[in-house]
Image (cartoon, rainbow, N blue to C red):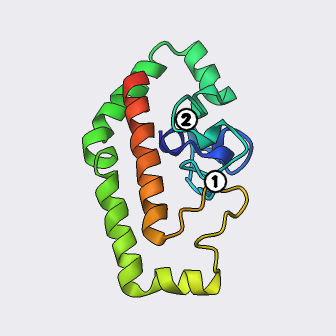
Amino acid sequence: LVNEIFKNQDAQAYSSIYLYKDVGGKLKYGPLWDFDIAAGNVNYSGAQYALGWWIADNIWISRMKSIDSTFEPRIRARWDQQKAQQIDTLNAYIDGSAAALQESGAEQRNFTRWPILDVQVWPNPVATGSYQGEIDYMKNWLMQRIAWLNENL
C-alpha cells in the first residue's frame, strides 16, 4: 500500500524492492526504501500522475489476485484500517516534518550545499521555486492520489 500510495517508480518490480521469507513463514515485502522518484517526482512514466494503478500491475500482485480471491478484499480492509490513523494524517505529518527541517536549519543547509531549489533536476517534472512550493506540490499530489485510491480500491 505504501508503494502504491506514493506510486514509487522503482517499486513496480524494476528495482528497489525486497522480498523475504522467514523459515516456515510467508513471503513478505520489505523493508521500504528508495522513494526519490515517488509521489509524482518523475517525468518519464505514468508514475508522474496521481491517478491510475501502479503497483497493482506488478507481477507478484497480479499473481496474488489471480490465485487468492480474498486478496483484494483484504487489501481494501487494510486500507480502511489504516486510513484514519495513518493516511488521513499524512498532510499534518508532512507539515510538521517540513517545519522541523526549517526550524533546525536543515532545509537551508540542504539548499546551500545543493543550490537546486528553482532548478528542474532530471527526472523531476517541475521546479516550484520555493521550499514551501515543493511541499505544497507533494501534498497536492498525495491528496489526489489518496482520493483516487480510496475510490478505486
Mark closer to the observer (2, 1): 1
**Kind of residue indicated by mark 2:** Lys
Q: Nearer the viewer, residue 78 or 25?
A: 78
Above or below, comparing residue 56 to residue 29 in the picture? above
Which residue sits at x=41%, y=53%? Answer: 139
Q: SS at mark 2?
A: loop
Which residue sits at x=26%, y=46%? Answer: 85
Which residue sits at x=65%, y=56%? Answer: 124
Q: Residue furthest left?
A: 84
Q: Is residue 127 left or right of residue 106?
A: right
**Kind of residue indicated by mark 1:** Ile
Counting residues from the N terminus, which is met first, the one under dot 2 or under dot 1? 2
Can I make out residue 5 in this image? yes
Which residue sits at x=32%, y=40%? Answer: 82
Q: Position of residue 26 (x, y in %)?
A: 55, 35
Q: Which residue is mark 1?
A: 37
Disc assigned to residue 26 = 2
Can I make out residue 23 in this image? no
User: Is mark 2 in CB contact (under 8 Å) with mark 1?
Assistant: no
Q: Position of residue 9 (x, y in %)?
A: 65, 45
Q: CA distance from mark 2 to mark 1?
A: 29 Å
